[in-house]
Image: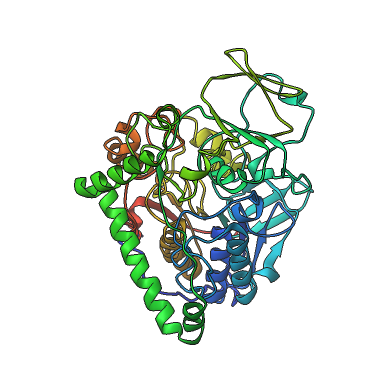
Amino acid sequence: MHGKATQGQAGTSSRFGTKGPRVVIIGSGVSGILAGVKLLERGWRDFVVLEKAETLGGTWRDNVYPGVACDVPAHVYVYSFAPNPAWKTRYAKGPDIWRYYHDVAKRHGVLDHIEYGKNVVHAGFDGVRWTVQTADGSNYEADVVIGAPGRLRDPKMPDIPGMDSFAGPSFHTARWDTSVSIKGKRVCLIGAGSSGVQILSAVARDVAQITQFQRTPQWVMPVADEAVPWWKRLLFRLRPSVLRRTYRQMLDFSNERGALAFESKQARAARDKMCSDALLRIRDPELRAKLTPDYDVGCKRLVMSETWFEEVQRPNVSIVTEAIERIEPTGVRTKDGVLHECDVLIYATGFDAHAYIRPMRLTGEDGITLDQVWADLPLTYRSVSIPHMPNFFMLNGPSSPGGSASIIGIVETQWDYIAQLLDRIAADGVLIAPREESAKAWLETVRERARNSVWSTGGCQSWYLDHTGTPAYDAVSLPQLQASLAAPVMDDFEVRAISTQ
């Protein structure tokens, strides 16, 4: 039980039979689909994916607002085993991304393992296996549980007096009401982050008036979202080797840029100048002042847009920086006494990015609960496992990297690490959980590293920070993550045989 886990795909013990351990995957977004594909690749067919909604897709199912798109180049925002020749633009639009992940799940057979309308409320460990309970009363037994619910899952609504009093349609961007037309309407848009910028850029020319309420300005990186020409899409389809080479080149560039974001003063200075110079496109000095952040570039997640700089200057666009006092039936009243009237009210106020697998309850060995383990901070070991929770693993869990790397590369790297632990579980019929002291030591290393990052020193409040004001993400690039997760050090885990009682 010492040293490193063995590499490669292990056979299954007699305890599990030829199908492998019984696995429950929670969530059918990017991470859940990946887990399903990888289990099928290793011949583990005895698994189920529990999805609370009525279709798969996670973030890209829930976010259907106008202008929704990914801020990572499309040809990199794919699984490494499934490059996509069909992207039509450099930065893929939300519906195209959802279609890609649905097609991957279908092509690899994951759809057959998904059960919809299954909202997981509790997972409990009895000393041998897990029982996963859903809100409809269903129970699922599992030898291994993979938590993949996603971070951008639960909309974060503001606490503003009178929110229920608004007479017209009102909704969060992640719960966009597609039955409501905003064309020719007066729109109040609360929030100026990524979704707020995307919506304003997409609808400003179609609405009568849009008033955006901005608490903190964002640094916006001008990016050209050029179309991928038809001949290149055809070439990618006919010559997969060209597509794979393009993917690798773009990934290497993205990884290098991500590493420079943490390590190179020159790269950061060039990025800062690009963002600052772009603001000079705002002709009105008063408006430009409103839109100029007073914190370092990268302290909050960079917003990507090429069209925002022009759209925000339209005569029917207003940027309001006064604090909101309350919502009234006909609009939003700010603390200077002004009532900003509107027909539709939209909340672009982000997500509870620190909920992780909660509000699901988790009860591990000896009745120890997740709330107990996470009483002070979300304690994990390398973001993928939790002390006292044997054979429970996570993708994109607490303290995963953020800011510079594509989520796809992160979760693929984490999966490769988890897979080595699964090999050990299957081969030897064991329970594996990280030692609490190992998790605490690793978390302190992450927090110490992040204290020197721009998230901590950049002079802003953001969802990169936890309730203590310390970054909740690991300040490493994807290549650094890959090196650190190359192989598990088994001395950091408690490993014991599964009881036959």
Quadrant showing the N terminus: bottom left
Q: How is the image coloured?
A: rainbow
Say whether residue 243 is left or right of residue 105: left
Q: Nearer the viewer, residue 94 or 244?
A: 94
Residue 144 visible (yes or no): no
Q: Position of residue 284 (x, y in %)?
A: 43, 32
Of residue 162 and residue 51, the one placed in the foreground of this image is 162
Quadrant placement of the C terminus: bottom right
- Determine whether 198 is above or below 11 in the image: above
Left or right of 1, for residue 97:
right
Can you give x and y, in whole percent of width and height, for residue 307 in the image?
49, 49
At horizontal 35% and vertical 51% (from top left) the residue drawn is: 492
Q: Residue at 50%, 74% (x, y): give it.
A: 82
Q: Nearer the viewer, residue 384 or 296?
A: 296
| Residue 459 percent location from the top left of the image | 34, 29
230 up-or-down from 423: above or below = below
The quarter of the displayed image where residue 356 is located: top right
Specify whether 361 is left or right of 166. left
